[in-house]
Amino acid sequence: MIYSLLLAAQLLGQSSDPFDYGNVYLAETRDRELPRFHLGVGYAFNISNSYLNLDSLTGTAQVRVWKYVSTGLFGQVTQSELSAAGSQLRQLEKVDLHAQIPTPRWGLFSLSYLQFMLGRWNVLNLMPLESELLFGGGAGVLNRGKDTNGPTENKFSYLWSVEHRFLFCERAGIFVSLFGVLHSTYLQSGIHIRFD
Amino acid sequence: MCFIALICNPEFIFASTNLIEEALSLESKNPEAAENLFLKIERTDPQFKIVVEELQKIFYREGNWPRFFGYAQYYRKRWPIAERNQTQFLEVIALLRHCQNELVSRFVDAYKKELPRYADKLNQIKSLSNTRFKGKGASEKSVKSIQNHFEGQSLWPLPSDKIAEVNPKNLRIAVENQCSF
């Protein structure tokens, strides 16, 4: 997988100038800013809700506003089903005990990131690896059902995120993040592309 | 730009001129010292073109091919052909010494169109590319990734279109020596 990404990056990086030749290297480590534009898509699952299994498809687009700060949008579409605990809670309806389980459907948030830490390694000078740690926050709208099958409502929600990005080639890589919205925390992983 | 720099800070120009003069005087006696002086001049300096030309000569003489090709490609990409001097032909000769005949032929054909007054010299270079002779093949000094790693140097792959945007002192270009003798 990693080698396929590296190969793809090399092919993308090849120039069409007929007078280019040789393998070009830069012999240094240098400060690297956040990308001018950044896109990511991922899958997230909930780690804080006992009554629901929540699987989300997420997407983010970021634009650099300063060297180490970017801002943009974060979107989330969630599919939900009752967990074992949730199903047992529903069983209590037989004895006329009703519990409402708020169920998130989708959310759209503003999200700003601060690049906190950056590491670049070239493993044995053969496999470049770059890693970034970012802290982010924002706010937006969370659409959720008042109950699993109930009517939906739009609620104002905060968003926080701690994201770790890895770049295996010049422009693309994977990320892992922990993010939270109103009453829910998710673990997310996905792929991202940067445009400098 | 040169004019603005002169108005704002005339010492800036004179300081780099002194450095260049000192380096030029050292170039034949002590190329290493000259190289260190040249490397002190920033690439925003109006006289940086002279630095790039002289460093190409030094690295060519030393047979330090990764650095030579770095400066040669930077020179070609940063300045248009009308602003370059005959130092640009060193790149073709170095490629000839690596038996990169197809590239040599491509360069010669392009230069003949742009600089017809050098057609004879360029034809000689082209004919040498088809000839085997002692001393043609360049000495081996190439980019060795793992060796560089153990020497504490980090090498990052760089797309060719970014060559003109970086400091050429950090460029290393590995060119395969295809001479089989």
Image (tube, coloured by chain):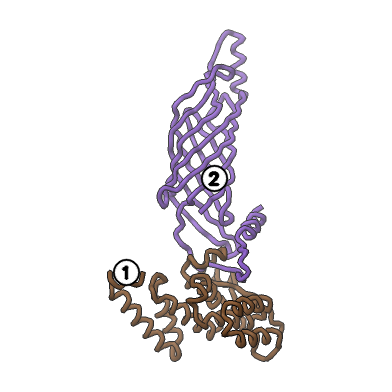
Chain colours: A purple, B brown
**CA–CA distance in space, label 2 to label 1:** 41 Å
Q: Is residue B166 left or right of residue B1?
A: right
Q: Chain of mark 2?
A: A
Mark 1 closeness class: few <14, some 14–19, many ≥20 residues within 10 Å: few
Q: Residue at x 52, y 70 (%)?
A: B77
Q: Is residue B57 visible?
A: yes
Residue A10 lies in quadrant: bottom right
Secondary structure type for disc 2: strand
Q: Which mark is residue B4?
A: 1
Q: Is residue B157 visible?
A: no
Which residue matches tag 2?
A39
Amino acid type at mark 2: Leu
Secondary structure type for disc 1: helix
Q: Is residue A85 above or below residue B69?
A: above
Q: Is residue B107 left or right of residue B22?
A: right
Residue contact between numbered discs 2 and 1, judged by CB atoms under 8 Å: no
Residue B69, image x and y in percent? 56, 76
**Depth check, front residue: B146 or B132:** B132
Residue B90, image x and y in percent? 56, 82
Q: Residue at x 57, y 63 (%)?
A: B159
Q: Is residue A102 above or below residue A65?
A: above
Amino acid type at mark 1: Ile
Residue B55, image x and y in percent? 47, 80
- Look at discs 2 and 1 and give the one toward the viewer: 1
Residue A38, image x and y in percent? 52, 47
